[in-house]
Image: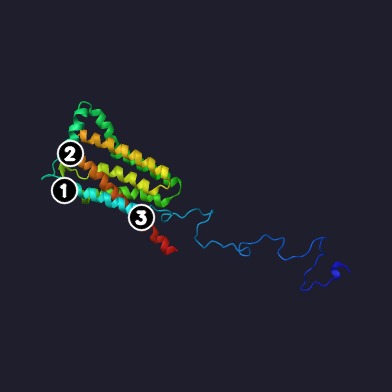
Amino acid sequence: MNVRDRPTGAGRLYLPLRPGRSRRANTDRPESPVTSGTRLPAAGADSPATGPRSRGPEHTADPVTTALTAAAGATVAAAIPLSFPPGGGPTAFDLAVNEQVDPRLDPRPWIAEVLALATDTGVVLAILCGAVAWFAWQRRWWETATVVLVPEAAVAINAWALKPFWSRPLHDYLAYPSGHTVHLVVVAATLVLLLRSVRAQAVIIALAAAAWCGAGIGMIALDYHLATDIVGGAAAGIALAVALYWVAVYAGRRPRARSG
């Protein structure tokens, strides 16, 4: 019988099979994700083609550790003013530190100026811009926004709330907590909270501690601040950084929860 004379059913032409080949359904077709049991990603979910989501943190710092750290910083910052004499003058600790710093750096004021550069606003902002560029290059947009907003919010809170509350005068400004110290410490602490690498966190902590010690000595020698201003600024900066970081985490997760 000619191939064309065979019944074709609903108008379909059946061609003869090649030798040694059997007809098995879907044998030569690649399995689709549905037939192979692979689950299709939900609409809006992350995929290699679309990249990571830009809303909300993917990883967060340990809540218990950060809470204890913030509590310790807040306790130190609140306890130091209890040692201030009437009028907010230098404490015994301040006088003891001045006796060690002044004789060594008064003859060499340029050394003190170099040391104090670590807390200079331009230097701290340059570090902040570098952090912004790093997170933006990785397309970690939540971290990019957080590393800007947390330090600047902390500086504003310190200037408009903490300084007037403790009201410690020095020259023609309020000195406690040291605003320059708060700015440096909050930028460093925010980076530590946002970075995922333990090694990078350790490097940031070591560099920030060295910069804080050097800048503190420089500011004391230049009579910009007393030692308790600088210690209180570091403590307040740590507490503010942690508190504002968790505010940013909560704010970043709310849109994701709604969209999910």
N-terminal-most mark, 2 or 1: 1
Helix, strand or loop at label 1? It is: helix
Rounded to the nearest angstrom, the CA distance separating label 1 from label 3 is: 29 Å
Please report the residue visible at 39 percent of the width from the left and 49 percent of the height from the top: 194
Q: Which mark is residue 68?
A: none
**Image-based side of 140 in relation to 65, left or right:** right
Q: Which mark is residue 82?
A: 1
Q: Is residue 256 above or below residue 217?
A: below
Q: Which residue is mark 3?
A: 63
Please report the residue visible at 37 percent of the width from the left and 50 percent of the height from the top: 145
Which kind of residue does numbered mark 1 sit on? Leu
Q: Percent x, y for residue 155?
A: 27, 47
Q: Does the rendering let one see residue 154? A: yes
Q: Which mark is residue 94?
A: 2
Rounded to the nearest angstrom, the CA distance separating label 2 from label 1 is: 14 Å
Please report the residue visible at 20 percent of the width from the left and 32 percent of the height from the top: 100
Which kind of residue does numbered mark 2 sit on? Asp
